[in-house]
DNA sequence: ATATTATATAAACAAATATTTATATAATTG
DNA sequence: CAATTATATAAATATTTGTTTATATAATAT
């Protein structure tokens, strides 16, 4: 019981479904998600912990960053995740997606500030 | 979003999963469920309302009684219901099942009290 | 070494959900 | 028709869950 219940509980909150949707195309670090959802970091960390506890996402630490991604190890969870992806109307998360794109772009820009690309 | 969310929310509570499990083999009236869960009636009515709102169960009124059963009109909900049936360990609900059996038996007994079965 | 950045966690607070108790309604039985 | 039974609903309360603010930790950059 505990197990199924934990999974359904994890899926029963809007912010968490939005996070799952954001992870559709690959891993993101916490700050990406914070930017995409336009919210504060502890809130995101809280929801990521709930999703991870339920085995729906996994994390990968790299330096200062923690990258989260969909955990597709188990069939049942996988199906649920796919359902979320499919059932949530796009226009319900377009703002998130746009904020994410903008943020990722700005990160890249910063990375190249003060550098010049030269042919090799 | 609303829709999926409502469904997951409905499934994210233990009493409700137990009710779904009880409905596995057919419809039951509210008082059957109250007896099986060994609890009070308003509590059961509350959870039945949540499940019905999510489209997971349906009701059928007959005299004083309201019979509830799994609503298998929709594929997604159906899959979720089946998952609940499969994923919840039997020994997690045996007490419920036994109380249910006893209660149903006692109802039949009462129905025959003062009567005698005769060959036709 | 110190400052900064990314993330987590704890504590205080707020909001949502579930439970209980009391009461209403509607059908049924005596 | 009065009493009883099955269920629903409303109001009060309790519990759980989520949010915010403050702080800790650990890696990196200055």
Image (cartoon, coloured by chain):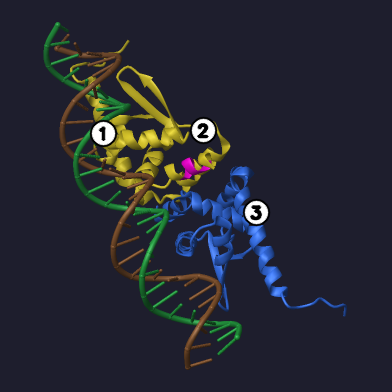
Chain colours: A yellow, B blue, C green, D brown
Chain part drawn in magenta: A4-8
Disc 3 marks which residue?
B98
Classify C4 as above or below A42: above
Mainly helix, strand or loop, the magenta region?
helix
x, y (%) of residue B5? 42, 52
Say which residue label 1 marks.
A41
> Is residue C20 placed above or below B90 in the rendered structure?
below
Which quadrant of the figure has residue A57?
A: top left
Q: Could you tell me if the residues under marks 1 and 2 are in contact, i.e. CB atoms within 8 Å? A: no
Please state the horizontal and vertical placement of residue D20, each as a whole percent of the image. Answer: 20, 41
Q: What residue lies at 56% left-to-right and 66% top-to-bottom? A: B31
Query: Which secondary structure, mark 1?
Result: helix
Q: Is residue A93 magenta?
A: no
What is the chain letter for disc 2? A
Marks 3/2: CA distance?
37 Å
Q: Is residue A86 left or right of residue B117?
A: left
């Amino acid at each position: 019981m505990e197990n199924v219940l934990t999974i359904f509980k994890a899926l029963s909150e809007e912010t968490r479904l939005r996070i799952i949707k954001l992870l559709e195309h690959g891993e993101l670090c916490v700050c990406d998600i914070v930017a995409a959802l336009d919210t504060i970091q502890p809130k995101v960390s809280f929801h990521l912990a709930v999703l991870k506890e339920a085995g729906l996402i996994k994390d990968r630490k790299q330096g200062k960053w923690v990258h989260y991604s969909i955990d597709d190890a188990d069939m049942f969870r996988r199906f649920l995740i796919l359902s979320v992806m499919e059932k949530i109307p796009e226009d319900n998360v377009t703002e998130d997606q746009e904020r994410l794109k903008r943020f990722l772009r700005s990160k890249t820009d910063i990375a190249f500030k003060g550098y010049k690309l030269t042919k090799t």
